[in-house]
Image: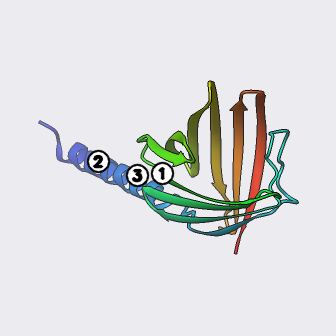
Amino acid sequence: MMGRRKALALACALGLASGLGTAHAAGRPDFSGTWKLDTLRSEFGQIPGGRPRARVDVIQHREPRIRQTLFIDNWSRQDTTVYLYTSDGKPTVNRVGSQDIRSTVWWEGRILRLESKTRLLIYDMTLKERWILSADGKVLTMARRVKYPLGEGEQKLVFRKR
């Protein structure tokens, strides 16, 4: 049988551990807002079509659901695309044009990780992305690595909250 002191110590330790778990979950960033791409601070790399004239993302984030609407000015045309994700590690599928994009999203501390895959004709494409929110909540950085049929590249997209 466990002594009273050991039982009290165990109860305190469990209470502390569960409190830490709650604080960690509550400490995750909320990416909700309207975000304008800062083209001067962003790094677009050598990815074909990777540098838009302008981009605005509207993100609605109610854990675990994330809705990301992209408004992109690609110089010759404007596109609007909506992506739906869940941050619980369960796969989601978004259809863009005739392509299915399969994504898995999860938390790694305060960083949101996304991995997406699609097939373009006979070629596989992958995107690995990290969303990082600044301490003041005014800057969202999307660090990405894209693997596409002609190679791979990296980008750092920097957004400012409007």
Residue assigned mark 1: 85
Please tell me how crowded label 1 is: few (under 14), some (14-19), or many (20+) other residues with Cα within 10 Å: many
Mark 2 lies on residue: 9
- Secondary structure of residue under mark 3: helix
Seen at 43% across and 59% down, the residue is 63
Query: Residue at horizontal 85%, vertical 58%?
Result: 41
User: Alpha-carbon distance for marks 3 and 1?
Assistant: 23 Å
Residue 48 picture location, percent across and down? 81, 40
Q: Give whichever of discs 2 and 1 has the lower sequence position.
A: 2
Asked whether residue 57 is in view, the answer is: yes
The first of marks 2 and 3 along the sequence is: 2
**Three-letter residue code for mark 1:** Tyr
The residue lying furthest to the bottom in this view is: 162
Q: Is residue 108 visible?
A: no
- Amino acid type, callout 3: Gly
Taking the spot 72% from the left edge, 27% from the top edge, the residue there is 149
Picture colour scheme: rainbow
Residue 2: x and y, percent?
A: 16, 38
Q: Which residue lies at the image location 43% right of the left edge and 40% below the top edge?
A: 91
Left or right: 32 as drawn, with respect to 154: left
Q: As rendered, which of 61 and 146 lies closer to the eye?
A: 146
Q: CA distance from mark 2 to mark 1?
A: 41 Å
Query: Disc 3 marks which residue?
Result: 21
Q: Which mark is residue 63?
A: none
Closer to the eye: label 2 or 3:
3
